Image (cartoon, rainbow, N blue to C red):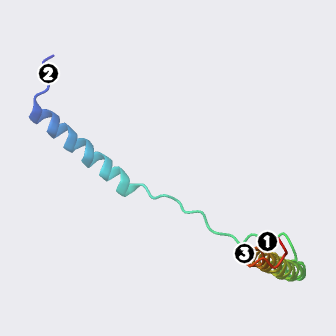
Amino acid sequence: MPKKTRKQKIVSGERRKLLLLSQMETVEIPRPSRQEVPSKHPPEEDLKLKNYFLLDLKKSVVFILIVVALEIAVYYGTINNYFGR
């Protein structure tokens, strides 16, 4: 059997593309319907968790600000010899 010529390869490639396109047009992909997933926690518990998170966040921010202020005070205190070195 002789080898395919370049033109024959091009024609067979185009035929293959047309076949794939016609198959893609006929096949419809079924889309799953989105169902609402029930929550793990009841709404009251979600509210409690949110309040606890916000309270904990506020405490953490205040603590961090105090630590940073102390570090700045110690830094400038040592520069200006307020601690007696």
Q: Secondary structure at mark 2?
A: loop
What's the residue at 45%, 58% (across, down)?
28
Locate residue 48, reporting x and y percent.
Answer: 90, 81
| Residue 27 found in image quarter | bottom left
The answer to whether mark 1 and mark 2 are in CB contact below 8 A is no
Q: Decide: few, some or many residues near mark 1? Use Cα within 10 Å; few <14, some 14-19, many ≥20.
A: few
Residue 79 shows which numbered tag? 3
The label on residue 20 is none
The residue that appears at 60% across and 63% down in the rendered structure is 32
Q: Decide: few, some or many residues near mark 2? Use Cα within 10 Å; few <14, some 14-19, many ≥20.
A: few
Which quarter of the rendered picture does the C terminus lie within? bottom right
Q: Secondary structure at mark 1?
A: loop
* Mark 3 element type: helix
Residue 14 lies left or right of residue 85; in this view the side is left
Q: Quadrant of the N terminus?
A: top left
Q: Nearer the viewer, mark 3 or mark 1?
A: 3
Question: Residue 58 sits in which quadrant?
Answer: bottom right
Q: Residue at x 10, y 28 (%)?
A: 5
Q: Which tag, 1 or 2, sits closer to the chain's start?
A: 2
In the image, residue 50 lies at what x, y percent? 83, 80
Q: Residues within 10 Å of mark 3 (few under 14, many from 20)?
A: few
What's the residue type where badge 1 is placed? Pro
Give the answer, above or below, for where 1 lies relative to 72: above
Task: Judge whether 7 appears above or below 74 on screen.
Answer: above
Q: Residue at x 64, y 69 (%)?
A: 34
Dot 2 or dot 3: first in sequence order is: 2
In this picture, is 43 found above or below 9? below
| Res. 38 mark | 1
- Please give the residue where the numbered disc 2 appears in the rendered image: 3
Kind of residue indicated by mark 2: Lys
Residue furthest front in the image: 85
